[in-house]
Amino acid sequence: QVQLVESGGGLVQAGGSLRLSCAASGRTFSKYFMGWSRQAPGKEREVVAVISWSDYSTYYADSVKGRFTISRDNAKNMVYLQMNNLKPEDTAAYYCAAVDVWSGSRWSPDLFAYWGQGTQVTVSS
C-alpha cells in the first residue's frame, strides 16, 4: 500500500514556474514507478510524467517535454514535478500516482494503482 499527498499547486502567470511535491508513505516506495497526471475540466485525465524506481528513467507527454521535470528522492519518500514556462493550457488538477509493476505499454492513467487527492494548478494569461 502507498498513500500519496500532493502539495505546491497554486495560481501563476503564464511563463511562470511551480514545483509540485508528492509525499508518499509505504515501506516499498523505492520500488514503485511514480507519475504525475492532470485533468482539466471537461477533459480526460492524462499522464504527463513518470519516473522509474530502478534507473530513474523518465517519460514525458509531448505537451510538457522541455518544460516539466520529474524527480524523486527515495530517502525522503518524495516525488517532485518542476514546471517551467507554464501555459494557460497547463491549468488542471494535478495528481501524484504510483504503481509497482509496469508492462512496458504506453503510460496511461489506468496503469496506476494508487492516487493522491490532487492539487490545483491555474495558469493565467
Image (cartoon, helix red, strand yellow):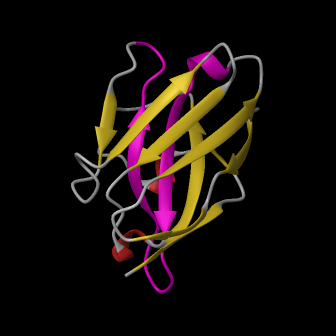
Q: Nearer the viewer, residue 73 or 19?
A: 19
Horizontal side of residue 83 vs 106, given as left or right? right
Up/down of 32 relative to 22, above or below = above
User: Which part of the image, by quadrant, shows the C terminus?
Assistant: bottom left
Expressed as whole percent of the image width and height from the top left, the position of residue 76 reads 69, 19
Expressed as whole percent of the image width and height from the top left, the position of residue 106 reads 29, 45
Q: Nearer the viewer, residue 119 or 17?
A: 17
Up/down of 115 relative to 79, above or below = below
Q: Which residues are magenta?
A: 29-54
User: Which part of the image, by quadrant, shows the N terminus?
Assistant: top right
Residue 97 visible in rendering: yes
Q: Is residue 41 magenta?
A: yes
Q: Nearer the viewer, residue 35 or 22?
A: 22
Q: Total number of numbered labels? A: 0
Q: Nearer the viewer, residue 99 or 87?
A: 87
Expressed as whole percent of the image width and height from the top left, the position of residue 124 reads 44, 79
Residue at image x 55%, y 60%?
Answer: 94
Residue 113 visible in rendering: no
Residue at image x 66%, y 13%?
Answer: 75
Horizontal side of residue 28 vs 48, given as left or right? right
Up/down of 83 relative to 105, above or below = below
Q: Is residue 75 magenta?
A: no
Expressed as whole percent of the image width and height from the top left, the position of residue 36 reads 49, 48
Horizontal side of residue 87 vs 9, given as left or right? left
Residue at image x 30%, y 44%?
Answer: 60
